[in-house]
Image (cartoon, helix red, strand yellow):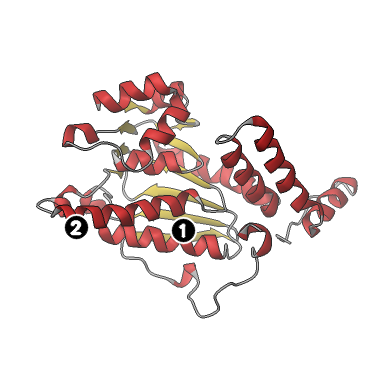
């Protein structure tokens, strides 16, 4: 049974620290409301680029939230400063790396990326500036993207003698279509937030100074809904896009049936009939 159903409010490992008690070297965490967590990529001096330590921090954060959501129902991911969301991999750290060290670091990044994709709660990217290379891939791995008007995107890896290796060749074609994705990846040319919206990669383009307010507004709406339902619906959508319709429907029904016996289902129906706002407990 998925962790969001069996263990939303139950600890699997009793001797570990709460996520909110941890201090990460490259990430800033702020629980701005009971159920809403803002995570900021916090290396502004390096364009919020991903170094080895950020890979470790990412892996730890998303793994912790997979094990125990600690009441968090939505995460907003953004970058420090007002110019750059993330410049991708830290090329200064990678300069003169041996092949072995490069592969070792990328293996860490791979696990961190997978752990983000498997996070049971929704993660919204609030792209406040440039999102290049792995930065664009990080945004694409989130459940959806709000972007500031000033934001720009690019997958520039082919200019460096590599290629997207953070699920860019998987997520981008699904967002913008295969032909558009080939143009973006093979040309390595940047594109604007408005173009990203037009092509289906970005859900909404916001004024630069209202990006976080607008992203938090939709995050609050998610937080107000039944958390077990959100978790199961997210998981079902992730699976259904990878399988045929018949098996996707079978998975959806299984996820649906897991919700029938929950206290939140009883509360939701009761609140509707009593014409009041439901108070969901995640049980």
Question: As drawn, is 234 to the left or to the right of 210?
Answer: right
Q: Which mark is residue 101?
A: 2
Residue underneath mark 1:
62
Q: Secondary structure at mark 2?
A: helix
Mark 1 residue element: helix
Q: Where is residue 206? Give x, y as percent.
A: 45, 33
Q: Residue at x 24, y 53 (%)?
A: 103
Q: Residue furthest top?
A: 179
Q: Locate the C terminus by quadrant.
A: bottom right
Residue drawn where x is 43% and y is 51% of the image: 114
Visible residue check, residue 84: no
**Extreme residue in the right direction:** 273
On the rendered image, what quadrant is the N terminus found in? bottom right
Q: Quick one: 77 or 244, which is closer to the camera?
A: 244
Disc 2 versus disc 1: distance between alpha carbons? 23 Å
Query: Is 164 displayed left or right of 275 in the figure?
Result: left
């Amino acid at each position: 049974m998925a962790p969001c159903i069996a263990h939303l409010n139950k600890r699997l490992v009793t001797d570990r620290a709460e996520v909110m008690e941890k201090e990460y070297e490259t990430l800033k965490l702020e629980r701005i409301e009971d159920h809403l967590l803002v995570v900021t990529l916090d290396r502004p001096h390096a364009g919020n680029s991903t170094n080895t330590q950020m890979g470790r921090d990412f892996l730890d954060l998303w793994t912790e939230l997979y094990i125990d959501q600690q009441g968090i129902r939505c995460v907003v991911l953004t970058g420090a400063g007002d110019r750059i969301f993330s410049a991708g991999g830290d090329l200064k750290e990678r300069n003169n790396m041996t092949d072995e060290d490069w592969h070792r670091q990328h293996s860490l990044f791979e696990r961190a990326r997978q752990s983000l994709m498997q996070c049971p709660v929704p993660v919204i990217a609030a792209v406040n500036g440039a999102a290049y290379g792995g930065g664009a891939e990080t945004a694409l791995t989130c459940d959806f993207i709000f972007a500031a008007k000033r934001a720009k995107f690019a997958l520039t890896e082919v200019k460096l003698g590599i290629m997207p290796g953070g699920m860019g060749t998987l997520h981008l074609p699904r967002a913008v279509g295969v032909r558009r994705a080939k143009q973006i990846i093979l040309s390595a040319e940047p594109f604007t937030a408005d173009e990203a919206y037009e092509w289906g990669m970005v859900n909404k383009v916001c004024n630069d100074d209202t990006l976080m307010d607008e992203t938090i507004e939709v995050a609050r709406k998610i937080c107000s809904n039944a958390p077990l339902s959100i978790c199961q619906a997210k998981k079902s959508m992730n699976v259904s896009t990878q399988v045929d319709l018949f098996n996707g429907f079978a998975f959806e029904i299984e996820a649906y049936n897991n919700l029938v016996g929950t206290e939140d289902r009883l509360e939701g129906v009761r609140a509707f009939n009593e014409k009041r706002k439901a108070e969901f407990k995640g049980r």
